[in-house]
Amino acid sequence: MLDKDLVFKYFLTFSGLDEDAGCRMRPVCDAAAGAISARLSEKAEFPRDMERLCLAAAAVAYSGYLEIGSADSSMQEIKVGDISLRDSAASGSSAKGAADLRDSFLAGVAPLLKAPFVFRQVAP
């Protein structure tokens, strides 16, 4: 099982939030830690691999944090008659960056994880 406090600490580092501001994302961090823990293979050794697995879980949580933030502020529109002004914040690029960060950290721990279950997947 991953150290959820360490995952949260790394999430705060990624996000730049202080502990009080980051508390609302604690369940996302805990869920990411649980998801990674559920996929651990026999190759994972503790405490040797704990730090990099926790970093990967924090990257997953951080990606979710940015996706949540971009959904909150992705679109603002002002319409006057036939003219409308739309501001789509650069959230797409930050969400893309977060996905790349997440994928990079997950790739680093891939040898320590079981393959993810895919619905209707046929066993080899």
Image (cartoon, rainbow, N blue to C red):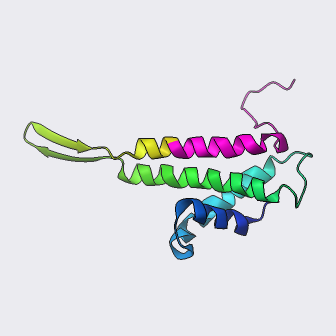
Image quadrant containing the C terminus: top right
Q: Position of residue 105 (x, y in %)?
A: 68, 46
Residue at (59%, 65%) from the top-left corner?
12
Magenta run includes residue 102: yes
Q: What are the residue bounds of the magenta stretch? A: 97-124
Q: Position of residue 16 (x, y in %)?
A: 52, 65
- Name the image quarter holding residue 58: bottom right
- In this rendering, the count of numbered labels is 0
For the view shown, which residue lies furthest in the bottom direction? 20
Image quadrant containing the N terminus: bottom right
- Looking at the image, residue 60 sits to the left or right of residue 91; the answer is right
- Residue 69 drawn above or below residue 13: above
- Name the image quarter holding residue 7: bottom right
Residue at (31%, 46%) from the top-left corner?
75
Q: Position of residue 2 (x, y in %)?
A: 79, 60
For the view shown, which residue lies furthest in the left direction? 81
- Looking at the image, residue 59 sits to the left or right of residue 48; the answer is left
- Residue 115 drawn above or below residue 74: above
Q: Position of residue 97 (x, y in %)?
A: 52, 43
**Looking at this view, is 24 or 9 the one in front?**
9
Residue at (88%, 61%) from the top-left corner?
47
- Name the image quarter holding residue 108: top right
- Looking at the image, residue 72 sits to the left or right of residue 104; the answer is left
- Looking at the image, residue 75 sits to the left or right of residue 55; the answer is left
Residue at (79%, 36%) from the top-left corner?
115
Magenta run includes residue 63: no
**Looking at this view, is 11 or 36 the one in front?**
11
